[in-house]
Image (cartoon, grey):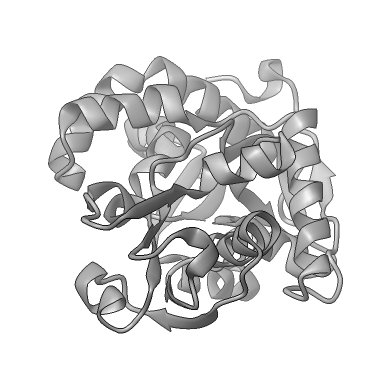
Amino acid sequence: MMYTVGSVPYLNAKPLVRLFEDLGERSPVKVVYDVPSRLPAMLKSGAVQAIMVSSIEALRHPGTRIANGVCIGTLREVLSVRIFSKVSPDKIQTLALDQSSMTSNALAEIVLDERYGVSPVMDPMAPDYQKMLANHDACVLIGDNGMREQGEVAHILDLGLEWFELTGRPFVWAVWMGNNDLSPELAGWLVTAQQEGACRMDAIVADAPEQTGLPPALCNRYLRDIMHYPMEDRELDGLREFGRLLVKHGLLKVAHWPEIVAPQGSSDAGV
């Protein structure tokens, strides 16, 4: 194996790493899994050459690189990142945040201010729906938890759809980020894995219910119809707009635009 990358262990990342798992010892890329909060330390230590990281991280630090051509994104709704509210969105005064995602929490703050004119008091918490809503008007849940929760509340906001209604752009939730070790060759493999993931989608969908506990129909819809993995000009435009709004709302002092690493061609990075 020539490279090692760090990935989140969530369902939406499976199509981006399935190729490397299937190739096993023949794979040029080894994948290690951990929660998002631990991945940046792996990159800093040099243990990995790239990490699948929340998009705000790619805008937070100067001198970063991201692999062009691949992301975890959505064109409209996302299903797995939602606000559950006991009151109408324009009445939310207290919001419990899912402490496992900085991007989703920042997006929630932007959406509530831009679309509903509210800036609630926000408290990071462990992702427990009942506990989060016990003393808050609303809560943010993400990932498999965000999809699994049925939400017996008056209002549910899908933050992917809210972003589209606000900006008309796709939303980039996560990217492959690295430093100087994120080479065009590695970017080529990451794009090839995304393309091959689409070809392996039947197997990924078939495995998903056992891995997540989610209904087969929901896994199928989420992976085939909701998730969007290519990253081209319109996705980069959405990422730029997110950076602009992060600065506008004081969530970043400066949005540092990363270096975009173009992948080597398929003839160099093919399977």
Give left or right: position of 229 versus 165.
Answer: left
Name the residue nearer the viewer: 83 or 79: 83
**Any part of residue 74 in sight:** yes
Image-quadrant location for residue 252? bottom right
Q: Which residue is pictured at 65% across the width and 54% down the height?
A: 115
Percent across and percent down for residue 12 are 40, 41
Report whether residue 39 is seen. Answer: no
- 201 left or right of 251 in image: left
Where does the image place residue 129, in percent across and percent down from the top left? 25, 68
37 on left or right of 155? right
Q: Is residue 257 above or below residue 122?
A: above
Q: Nearer the viewer, residue 264 or 235?
A: 235
Give the residue drawn at x 78%, y 59%: 245
- Closer to us: 182 or 168: 168
Q: Is residue 75 above or below residue 44?
A: above
Q: Nearer the viewer, residue 144 or 178?
A: 144
> Quadrant of the rendered structure where residue 74 is?
top right
Residue 163 left/right relative to 63 = left
Residue 105 horizontal/vertical position (percent): 54, 66
